[in-house]
Amino acid sequence: MSMDKVFGIAGSALAAQLVRMNTTASNLANASNTSDSAEGAYRAKRVVFRTLLQDQAAGEQTRYAGSIHIGNVVDDPTPSPRSYDPGNPSADDDGYVWQSNVNEVAEMVEMTAAARSYRNNIEVVNTAKQMMMRTLEVMKS
Amino acid sequence: MLDSLFGIHADALQLKSRRMEVLSTNIANADTPGFKAKDVDFRTVLGWKLGVGNLQSTHVNHWRGPGHSDNGEVFSIPYNPAVDGNTVEIGLEQAKYGKAAVDYQATLDFLQGRVSAYKRALKGE
């Protein structure tokens, strides 16, 4: 039945948006991390969404074609900013510290976007639920 | 049996729930890079069923005309495609989804009318 799929598809989107929001929380929490090397500095994480294609969903019982899943999590390629701060405990021998490349403003925007998308999918589920309830009531009248 | 009882409305309900499913896929994938929005275009599907613009084919892999697909799904053409290749326009999809829900409800009302008519007939009121 088709209406079942609406719940599955919108549900997968809810889960994916939650992962995106968790990533944002992680980025914001680590925004002021410092390190003594460019490699050790925290890099902002980004999730990449993928659509579950028809061929991939074939034979699966719980996931429907068109639902969404996390393809992978990638690091933001922006170079980590370096500053001269010899008093910092994590400064290297020359007195430089590397900060995380998290852009707080961008993270806030990302968080709002994830919340909005989450709400959109909640509305989809709500509408589908109402339609289903009404379908059940057709025989009652 | 059900077909003769409920006429066109049983098929219509299926079509409309199918459309809601396709539109919910669009909304779910509003942030997926490269996702192409789809829709069930009633006029096009009806055209195929009536054989309008269909090319004769003798093999399943033959090209049967522009935009032809067996499940009635067509790619929608975006007003403003995004740079990441996503063609979902969320406002438009929400509006479509709302309309699809109203369409579904309208068909349900027709069905309900049939059901109550049959019930009255059975009771002999």
Image (cartoon, rainbow, N blue to C red):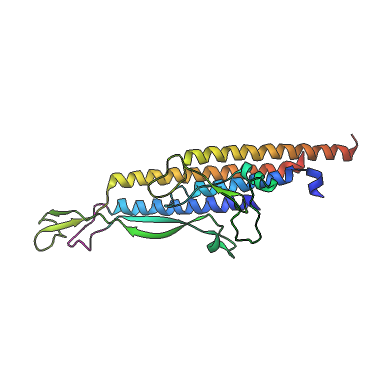
Q: Is residue B23 left or right of residue A27?
A: right
Q: Nearer the viewer, residue B88 or B44?
A: B44
Q: Identify which residue is drawn at 56% across, 54% down.
A: A8
Q: Is residue A93 left or right of residue B16?
A: left
- Residue A29 location (% of width, % of height): 30, 52
Q: Residue furthest bottom?
A: A59
The question of residue A37 being in magenta is answered with yes
Q: Identify which residue is drawn at 79% across, 39% down.
A: B114
Q: Residue furthest top?
A: B125
The question of residue A39 being in magenta is answered with yes
Q: Residue furthest right?
A: B124
Q: Is residue A32 left or right of residue B13?
A: left
Q: Identify which residue is drawn at 65% across, 40% down.
A: B104
- Residue B12 location (% of width, % of height): 69, 44
Quarter of the rendering containing residue B112: top right
Q: Nearer the viewer, residue B55 or A64?
A: B55
Q: Main secondary structure of the magenta part?
A: loop
In the rendered structure, which segment of residues is drawn in magenta?
A31-42
- Residue A22 location (% of width, % of height): 39, 53
Residue A132 in view, yes or no? no
Residue A126 in view, yes or no? yes
- Residue A15 location (% of width, % of height): 48, 54
